[in-house]
Amino acid sequence: MTGSHPTFKRSLLSLAIAGLLPAVAVAAPSNVAVEQVRDGRGGVKWQEVEEGRPGKAGEAGKGLIGIQSLGTDANGRTQVRIGKPDRVRESDSTDVFTSDEELDQHVIFQAFALYQPDDHATYQSLADNAAQLAEWGITDVWSPPPYRAASDSKYGEGYAIADRYDLGMYGKGPTKYGTAEELKGAIDALHANDIRIQVDVVPNQVIGLAERHVLPVTGVDMYGNPSNPFLTDYLYATYSAGTSVGQTEHGVIKDWDYFHFNGTSTQYQGLFRVLHDASNQPYRYLGPDHPENHLPEVLANSDAAKYGTINTIDGYLLADTWFAVENADSEADAVFAPLMMFFDEPRDGVVNQTFLEFARDNGYAGSDQEIRDAMMAELQMTPSPVGPLMDDYLKAQPGYYKESENDAEVAALRYDGPLNDASHIGANVLDFEFLIGNDLDTMREDVQEEQLNWQEYLLDFGFDGFRIDAASHINTDMLRDEVEQRLNYFAGDDVNEHLSYIESYVTQQVPFEESINYGHLSMDSGPFSGLLFSFGRDQAPVRTAFEASLIDRANDGPAAPNWSFVSNHDQEHNILVEVPLTEEEAQGEEPGSQPYELLQLEKYDEDRNRADKRWAPHNVPASYAILLTNKDTVPTVFYGDMFVSSEPYMSTPTPYHEDIVKLLQMRQQFASGEQVVTFEDSNTGSDGEDLLSSVRLGTDRKSGVAVVAGNDPALDTTVRIDMGTKHRNQWFVDAMGYHDERLKTDKDGILTVPVKGTQTVDVSGYLATWVPDLNGK
């Protein structure tokens, strides 16, 4: 533990890539090369390609599904790099899930967003609106993670999981979403309306533990590779032990400890909170007269050292250590004070000022001793103001708080304790190891048993299956075990009544799922990126909406069971944090904080209600029209695309609400049969640059739909769509209601569609969903 003090460079971009600043997303303006990168939380985001890296766009996105990079060549032509698995095996009847007409009937409603108010109303509203969801055609609900969140979590949602068995009970009041009793009521109401509900299960991390260890750590990247030589065998105070009421009552592991984890993301403890002397030797106190004690002068001959009334963590003194300054020999009468009242940090650059100087800047006056005397009097008070002042002091010092951690440019701190096994890191995972919080060592047998126990608890509670969060970052044996557990638990039931789908943005998920007979729905994130950058941003040809998918629908490619989405809670976040705020608009809030992001959301919502959008994606209805009529996928409708996320639950529709409802209802009635995708020519482009059609041929004259969609308001052309001979001489209408005219197929079933571009809140280009006119004469 000897050596010079570190000098860390700061780079917002490198911090974002490393995942240290999960709230940062780099904007993707037109005509600038962008690439897809891992966001450090199990998802993806977009960043500008660094200058001086010509030809290397997309390297950071290797292994990711969908658009890996996007830019232009020397001639100004759009260049799109797309990631896909090497092959996709067609599913069949021997698999757990089979991509077929029955599975295609499912539609998932993601029933939450990050920015919901903490009003505990989600479950009750879901119960009240269950019949409405069923009428829309929703078959499955993706529940928010219903667990008790850490008290300091940014959004108060259950991804910041503190007690995985507390669903809003134990006398602690409701979670963000409601009480356990209300959750049961919502499940019952959904079941009564023939809707199944999958719970978001979070197997990767535990956050909010109450007990600290001082552990030797190594600074690593997200894969677990050492990434900062200074942080090697480095002492760090980490919240890495503890339990909770639900964990104690129901868990296989009753008490979490550091050895259950591979390491942690930084915890705002600061890299210098463990106190050292000027020679960089740690201060230790192991008990009265212990030969290995090493104490600062103020404690060396104190009564606190004599009687053992010094608060330490694993025998180490910390910047937040308190000790008995009076009555040290009496546990009942001892008066404790912060060590910082009497201690000056000897290491350069660790603090901006001493505690007493900070106190002087915050209302105290007089000499150091006079301030100490005033504080000693205040320490007799209940509550004492000294404690909060001490907390504020620690947050203001770079070495004792997050500033030094951020400067270190590491994704995680690997635990190098005596019971940790570094060989477990990255073993048997589909992608990288470290995300956020304390990273569970999912190679451990007891951790695997705990996961199965937790999942059974949730199934017993009434859930029908799982959405498995960050599935690329856990031991894949746990995914295999979940399939076996689910099939045994629901033995005899139709497997499609008990969906389980994984979150994974990597191509490797597909061969893995094939190896376990498609035991889960793979996550096809290709349509998300393809739709966003073609219809949403107008930076890629609209054909990319299909080319980026795992399933090659344009060429009738093989289909593996999958789920897909237009947006989700993470991607709404990544888009809205691009929205700039002026100093006046920020109202003094700190960038990256939840209040700041809520102001960004307010501006983002205003923007998506404009025809000339600057930050919100264009053509959200077109994206849903394509997704909801696609064959061989289970599409997802995101809560935040239907309702304003920050308003009371299901109270404030977005401008796309009615469009999505119409599309859901149209899907139920008309979206069936084979799919034919055509990349159309137009007056403004060719081969699907700005216009395409996606046709479901239907199974009779009462079904079938032709989606015609483009992203250029200057479109002015005509397309001929082959609806098949069963639809010859038949009238069609636009189910969206955008176009009043009725169109009739000819004797061969050809529908001639006039395409005239427009620019509205809903459409920038063209959109129609032509379906048989069942009400016409």
Image (tube, rainbow, N blue to C red):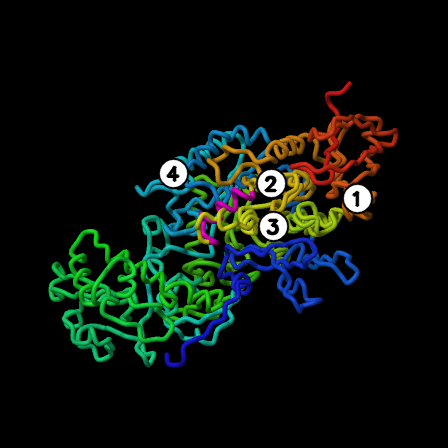
Element marked by disc 2: helix
Tell me the amino acid under the disc marked 2.
Arg
Element marked by disc 4: loop
Residue picked out by circle 1 = 678
Tell me if mark 4 has few (under 14), some (14-19) or many (20+) residues whose alpha carbon lies within 10 angstroms of its own.
many
Residue picked out by circle 2 = 608
Element marked by disc 1: strand
Tell me the amino acid under the disc marked 1.
Thr
Residue 332 visible at all: yes
Residue picked out by circle 3 = 523
Front in this rendered view, residue 510 or 647: 647
Is 143 left or right of 732, judged from the image as shown? left
User: What is the distance, in whole Å, between disc 2 and disc 4 at their CAs?
Assistant: 33 Å
User: Which residue does the image show at 66% across and 37% down from the upper left?
Assistant: 762
User: What is the distance, in whole Å, between disc 3 and disc 2 at their CAs?
Assistant: 27 Å
- Which of label 2 and label 1 is nearer to you? 2
Q: Which residues are magenta?
A: 591-604
User: Which residue does the image show at 59% across and 34% down from the upper left?
Assistant: 657
Front in this rendered view, residue 387 or 410: 387
User: What is the distance, in whole Å, between disc 1 and disc 4 at their CAs?
Assistant: 49 Å
Element marked by disc 3: strand
- Which of label 2 and label 4 is nearer to you? 2
For residue 179, the mark is 4
Tell me the amino acid under the disc marked 4.
Thr
- Disc 3 or 1, which lies upstream in sequence? 3
Count of marks overlaid on the render: 4
- State whether residue 213 is above or below residue 453: below
x, y (%) of residue 327?
Answer: 11, 64
Is 97 left or right of 409, judged from the image as shown? right
